[in-house]
Image: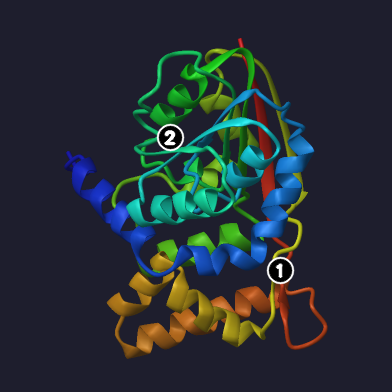
């Protein structure tokens, strides 16, 4: 029998990964896309919203601006500090908590909407994460997830990460972008489940593909950690494969990068 993975150790590595680099800087150019997706959800003012794996507040901040009562939760201390600073600068009241999607520190049925944009999909134990997302949502409320699809650009990027640094006994995060898998994970406690594949709006960076890869290495913690762990030859191979991938999905015709990045939008109505 193979040994069970040490979840505490893996969680510690995951936290270190998200706290490495400068995710706020990396994600800034695609923040507009997050706002457009948020607007499409039409969340009523004064409703209660939980933003799971909130990062630096790409959803929580615009939600608070629109009058929604927002709580954000993330495991990365530094991202939460940045989110709090952004909210304070705008005079917004947002509760930002440090915590784990697999064990949310909120009572049952606490929120009208529980959302996660490209965050909860990275939970180490997806079944626990799914149960928690549903648990804290009120009956009739919505659980909304945005997840990269396995075959899309960013799903393929995740697979490259896994190729050069294989995960330790945990399922690929890209499975949250597979309809059949989502159907299985969200079968309990859900009255209605809707899924749609979409292209992320405005995934644009103002420099060439090779420059984008270097920008990613410097600012996206997971990519930087993988580069640092590889020897020179494997670093070269990793960089080359990232550049080749992004060249395929780049829709820009000048020396910029505009990636066609497919995601799966999941909407589950709590039973």
Q: Position of residue 158 (x, y in %)?
A: 50, 60
Query: Which comes before the other along the chain, label 2 or label 1?
Result: 2
| Residue at x-position 72% and y-position 82% | 256
In the rendered view, tell whether residue 36 sits above or below residue 192.
Answer: below
* Residue 98 percent location from the top left of the image: 35, 41
Farthest right residue in view: 253
Residue 165 image-quadrant placement = bottom left
**Residue farthest front in this picture:** 91
**Residue 210 x %, y %:** 59, 86
Closer-to-camera residue (137/244): 137
User: What residue is shown with label 1?
Assistant: 259
Quarter of the image where the N terminus is located: top left
The residue carrying mark 2 is: 126
Q: Quadrant of residue 70?
A: top right
Secondary structure beneath label 1: loop
**Rendered position, 117 above or below 252:** above
Instruction: Bin the neighbour count of mark 2 within 10 Å (Cα to Cα): few under 14, some 14-19, many 20 and up.
Output: many
**Image position of 83 (left or right of 243):** left
């Amino acid at each position: 029998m193979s040994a069970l993975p040490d979840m505490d150790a893996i969680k510690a590595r995951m936290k270190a990964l998200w706290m490495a680099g400068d995710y706020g800087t990396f994600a800034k150019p695609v923040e507009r896309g997050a706002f457009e997706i948020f607007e499409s959800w039409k969340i009523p003012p004064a409703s209660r919203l939980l933003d799971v794996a909130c990062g630096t507040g790409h959803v929580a901040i615009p939600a608070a601006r629109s009058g929604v009562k927002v709580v954000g939760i993330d495991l990365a201390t530094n991202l939460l500090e940045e989110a709090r600073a952004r909210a304070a600068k705008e005079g917004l009241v947002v509760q930002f908590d440090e915590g784990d999607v697999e064990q949310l520190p909120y009572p049952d049925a606490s929120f009208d909407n529980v959302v996660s944009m490209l965050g909860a999909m990275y939970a180490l134990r997806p079944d626990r994460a799914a149960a928690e997302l549903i648990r804290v949502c009120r009956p009739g409320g919505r659980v909304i997830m945005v997840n990269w699809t396995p075959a899309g650009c960013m799903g393929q990027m995740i697979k490259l990460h896994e190729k050069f640094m294989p995960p330790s006994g945990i399922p690929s995060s890209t499975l949250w972008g597979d309809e059949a898998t989502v159907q299985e994970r969200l079968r309990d406690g859900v009255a209605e489940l809707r899924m749609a594949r979409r292209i992320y709006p405005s995934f644009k960076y103002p420099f060439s593909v090779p420059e984008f890869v270097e920008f990613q290495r410097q600012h996206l913690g997971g990519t930087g950690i993988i580069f640092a762990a590889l020897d020179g030859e494997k670093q070269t191979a990793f960089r080359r494969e990232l550049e080749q991938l992004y060249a395929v999905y780049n829709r820009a015709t000048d020396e910029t990068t505009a990636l066609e990045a497919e995601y799966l939008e999941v909407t589950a109505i709590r039973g």
